[in-house]
Image (cartoon, coloured by chain):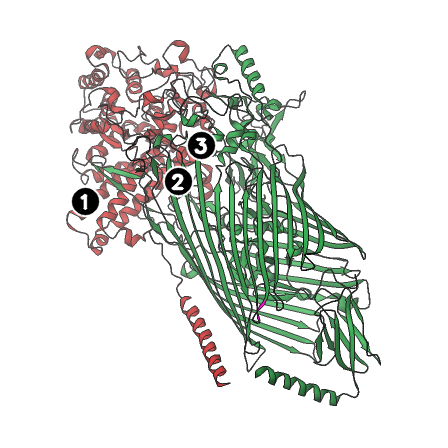
Chain colours: A green, B red
Amino acid sequence: MRKISQKLMLSFVMFFMSLAAFSQNAVTGKVTDSKDGTPVVGASITVKGTKTATQTAADGSFKINAPANSTLVISSVGFAQQDVKVDANSVANVSLTQVNQQLNELVVVAYGTKRKGDLTGSVTSVTAKDFQKGVVNSSEQLLQGKVAGLEVTTGGGSPGGGSRIRIRGGASLNASNDPLLVIDGVPVEGNGIAGSSNLLNTINPNDIESISVLKDAAATALYGSRASNGVLIVTTKKGTKGKIRYNFNTQLSTGIVGKTVDVLSGDEVRAIINADAASGGNNLYKNLLGTANTDWQKEIYRPAFGWDNNVSASGAFKNIPFRASIGYLTQDGILRTDNFKRFTGSLNLTPKFFNDHLSVNLALKGSNTKNNFANGGAIGSAIAFDPTQSVRSNTGKFGNYTEWLDPNGTLIDLATRNPIALLNQRDNTSSVNRFVGNVQLDYKIHWLPDLHLMVNLGIDNASGSGNDNIDSASATNYKTGGRKSFYEQKKINTIADVQLFYSKEFKKLKTKFDVLVGHSYQDFTTKVKNFSSFSYRSVADPANPQRKDTIAGSQPTFLTDKPQYRLESYLGRVNLSIANKYLITASIRRDGSSKFAKDNRVGYFPSVAAAWKLKDDFFKSVNIINDLKLRVSWGSTGQQDGIPYYSYLPYYSRSEAGAQYQFGNTFYSFLRPSAYDPDRKWETTTTTNVGLDFGFLNNRISGSVDYYIKKTKDLLSTVPVAAGGNFNIELLTNVGNMENRGVEFTLNTVPIKKQNLTWEFGFNFTYNTREITNLLKQQDPNFKGIEVSGISGGTGNNIGRFNVGYAPFTYFVFKQVYDPATNRPIEGLYEDLNRDGIINQSDRYYYKKPASDIFVGLNTQVTYKKYSLGITGHGAFGAYLYNNFNSNNGVLRQIKNPINFIGNASANYLETGFSNNQYLSDYYIENASFFRLDNINLGYNWGKIMKGKASLRIAASVQNVFIISKYKGLDPENSNDTGVDNNIYPRPRIFSLGFNLDF
Amino acid sequence: MIDMKNKLIKYVGFLLVVALVAASCAKKLDLFPTNDLTPEKAFANAAGYKSVLAKIYGTLAITGNTGPAGNPDISGGLDEGSQVAFIRMFFNCQELPTDEAVVAWNDQTIKDFHNLKWTNADPFLKGIYARPIYNITLINEYIRESSDAKLAERGIGGSEAADIKNSVAEVRFLRAYNYWVMMDLFGKSTFITEDDLVGAILPKEISRANLYLYIEKELKAIEGQLAPVKTAEYGRVDQGAAWALLARLYLNAGTYTATTNYTDAVTYAKKVIAAPYTLYGGYPRVFMADNDKAKDEFIFAINCDGLRTQAFGNTTFFVHAACGDEGAEYGVSGGWYGYRSTSAFVNLFSDLTGSTDKRAMFTTSKYGTSPAQLVITDISNFDQGPHVKKYVNLRSDGGPVSDSRKEFADVDFPAFRLAEMYLVYAEAVLRGGTGGDAATALGYINNIRTRAYGNATGNISAGQLNLQFILDERGRELYWEGHRRTDLIRYGLLTTGTYLWPWKGGVSSGTAVDSKYNIFPIPASNLVANSNLTQNAGY
């Protein structure tokens, strides 16, 4: 009934309009793509200045009634808009030109979307077609090297592993430097969950439509007290009206270990020990030598297979647009026993009701991930274990794995453990379920359609549990007869947003504005269950093989815990566009957080931004310039992640079973007060950004340049406090300032664009410097900085400092003296930098830092007929790493271990000849600049198969192709903020083959 | 149409409800931890007080709220196991700079201790500065929460209230003891009492002389409030502890204040000896896993337990750090290959084998006491030097220890025991203190030696009793118990060239060092955090 009345209405309007028009003629035509002449489906044709409009059909044809001498406006997403004069002609064939950087493209921003051309803040959106190709297990890796100002560094080669994500360097010292992550409107948990090494891997990258990277405060300030490190907004794919279309893709991959650490061979170790015994006359170590030549690294690594399958259906079901997908991934790690499995399902529904007045957006994502965590300790053990020993022994002890025993036959507790035993005797598995779902209701008020009431209700529910069991024969846990342990954790985040949105356009003034006001409430609840650990007693108690004994001291003090925090916020934003040339955005958010005491709970985070479309004012008639826009923004944001939930309160904690004290014959557990800071609040970062967006030559050259200054004050820093002034000697408090400054440059070009051949080339460049500008409440010239960056070797050794005037984690080391004849470092000899005649702690100096100054990303794509070739790479320059592997293992002491066993040394020992460790020498600080070719991807578009019912694309790719670097260690790309390179899981080189079927 | 309108009304209504729910939830930003307690709840009943009291005592034995490590009391970039444990750090300060101990490890600056060349940046010193002050901060809080008014307010009365009042005197003793450690190591100290609220003040500094007076005043004030001597339950202190600390304080009054006071040293040593305490039979048993049986000799022991009081820095440290492969002899699963002694020290014994003087516990299955073994050419080589097997995690009754894995020790650490009081008495008398006599002093010394030898063959004559003999005897009786540095300073031997031992000052034959090393520097980070503090001379 309603439909008929609508149609009637439309006919009446048309009728009257046609009466009003002087002369009316039916214009027909066809809209095609200028590139290859294929029809453009769904292009919209509007008679300029009227409401008369239509769309092209499947063959690109259209028919519209237009008065003579009127103008038709033809537009379609992905193409430049074109105006066509209708003279006496009744036929208008139009060829539309594709635009590379479409300014009309909608970009997801904080609490809404915006036309790319209207952005006032610094936002980069990467859509599915530009994502990293090949095997990508976790969503953040889709962006690696793609966005200026965004540095994604994988933690290593573990398949489910996490990455370090930094937007513009990170604004914090001791609070989090991770960006806020928003998935389909739900800001999600950033702290991970027990059983998962990376909560982001629970989202299937195949379901992601786009990721927006919000960089300056103008873009992020609406997220207030959590936005200082930028925001990533992930939007999943949605269905569109039309026929249901299916997609199936599958990808097979094999990863191999590209490079292993350079250590000595069995023969080399034998030679060193024999020579040492001959010169020293002591056969202690010689007698321990084995006869094997075991390459322990070869033993622990293997080729890693992966298989990723995804099926999706998208279209409309009974007029409800939907997209549904399921995915299954299994991925081995190159470290034996390492495996990651993921099963995902997603459903998006986007129906509209009440004459399109109510839009509903339902997005549900569920996943189950299963991890089989390999014992990462095997990597370090493989490097350090004696290569003259074979994997197995026949002692009948420790599962017949070779382990170091003392002359009495008992295990040497502090000796290196057999790497293969570490892998095989530990069974560490977890299962993580996650559900992220939300419903967004957008109601256009019937009596005032300019006003929208929007509600967003969302939930992010994750639960992780796992078993970590160690065999009773294991050298690591034989004393307790093995170990069985279990853990369980749940996280429930809920969000309720209510917003009012009003937009109004004043056509005569060519001015439009919109206003958003909203309220947001979010609750983060974690539920932890604590369990005792048990020992295996199947051997000791054959009558009862299932008998479990609680391992003493493992009883938890509390069986459960429920940490929780909440945020309550009000937000508002105004967008103003004058003459479509001058754009102004202002926003403010008021956040209240339960993490802070009442008086410090509320904060305001404002921002203002303006953009000026210079093109329209100065270069309107200059055809080679398609776009030129200047952006200026200022705003402030906060950071409260990474700090304890209740620590503004004085409170007493109960001690655990191993921490009691005996009075008489009774043991009493403790109640201990914790250090607290009632004055703590979030840290605040103020960002100023100036940017220029440009597009030339039909947008075949486009890009942007940004300059920014980020100043953080009230840094959440862990600083020394007066002993006796609080219940600790350091406190996480608001003190200090830090500055990030940088330049970002993005360039996208299309050097060749022909009928059969296209070549696209993209480049991004970021320069960022970071400096601590203050760390103390009262300034002190004698302040020596705060020790950070613990290293392996010795106990409590730190290599870095936080200090004023330096980048965070700047190394604090001794200046090595070299033998001028051989150029070799002289063991234990350092420069007396203060010339006081003694070499002591006062001679350490600040030297280099772990963060890179410059990082670049490159991507290029060549399409020739049905073939395409894509290459991506990224690099970082100016970073230095502390080669902890060489400093800890590159010494004779490592081979002739003082605890009377033999180990293996880094080949670096042959260069230094050091007997003892020289942990604090600057010799071990190495240049870690690199360029890595991430991916070569070859695609072939097979075209129609199965009698035209389906189309097939095939892609083959190689990942982690090569790396260029001077760094002597395994891999110069390190996700550790401290720059301490130790025990890294090698990133595999992966070969993959993928098939993509649309039908 | 009407149907649609109704629907619409319903929908708008629903949205409004959602909005209201959101708004009402939003007020709830006052959240509290599920398991942790606010101070009001922690001190709501007597059991809570007892748990805080256990923590105060426990801070001397272990390092945090999780045994053995993982939830430290003191962070600040320090290593929990090796840098903030009271017993271990006290040992490193009192023994490593002397002839009694050297260490093989490369942990940061640990070798600076024996080399007598530490700096104000030393992380170990940062730890031992922080530990006593932390303990005092807890004690002050406890005293504040134990006022009559607060107990009454919380409805705690009767014997519970009496026990809490009693415990206030105990914690005041512990505060005095912690301040004594500060005074002895650093000279001056950060100074806070129950009048200084946490978080409210920048603590003041107190000079060595004033700290001495404060400790003396406090100990005398609580003398009458503590439980009568030898009546407290094991692990808690009574009058005897206050007397013993006073005796030790007065013996070193010359070091602390430049004015000696040997007479009071005699007075308080006598009080302890008269209690009466008695020497426990068999010297080696005093340092075994079941040494709680020596409670008639122990005036105050810090209790350790392999299962329930675990740390890497209590007596667990003694048993592991002193052994290597031969861990089984020490009653532990494995050695840490770290600490030995020097020839200069062990040669205070005429027979190193332990067959005459049982205190000479330097022979293990792997290492003997041959002259070649005693020589240390490389401090980092654990195989060299005399090994010490004084503390062992074995029970004298042969029974099993608490920790079946044999990782953590049951041995209690004697902070004060009777033998020291005998030695204080004798030395104070010899140095001119009145109220005692040389004959009694000789008797006390021979009590010690009779126990050491198992018979009277080691007894000395009046003519042999002199100050050097007492220093040597203190070494033989009290080595590795945290006395040596204080003793060598009292005798003027720590930094001077009068007495040299291997690797003193970092030189194999030993050398004199600057006299500033008689006192440790105030760790630099403390000066940064607290502008009221001043550095010691020379640093």
One can see residue B535 in this view: no
Residue at position x 55%, y 82% in the image:
A447
Q: Main secondary structure of the magenta part?
A: strand
> What amino acid type is highlighted by mark number 3?
Ala
Q: Residue B266 vs residue A92: left or right?
A: left
For disc 2, the neighbor class at 10 Å (few under 14, some 14 to 19, many from 20) is few
Q: Which dot marks residue B163?
A: 1
Most extreme residue toward the front is A947
Most extreme residue toward the right is A88
The chain identifier of the residue carrying mark 2 reads: B
- Marks 3 and 1, how far apart at CA: 44 Å
- The answer to whether marks 3 and 1 mark residues whose Cβ atoms lie closer than 8 Å is no
Secondary structure of the residue carrying tag 1 is helix
- Marks 2 and 3, how far apart at CA: 37 Å
Residue B296's place in the image compared with A244, above or below, is above
**Snapshot quadrant of residue B376:** top left
Q: Which residues are magenta?
A: A316-320
Q: Nearer the viewer, mark 2 or mark 3?
A: 2
- Residue beneath label 3, please? B537
Residue B15 lies, in percent from the top left, at 46, 74
Compare marks 2 and 3 and give the one earlier in the sequence: 2
Residue A104 lies, in percent from the top left, at 69, 66
* Nearest the eye: A917 or A993: A993
Q: Which dot marks residue A734?
A: none
The chain identifier of the residue carrying mark 1 reads: B
> What amino acid type is highlighted by mark number 1?
Asp
Compare marks 3 and 1 and give the one earlier in the sequence: 1
Q: Which dot marks residue B70?
A: 2
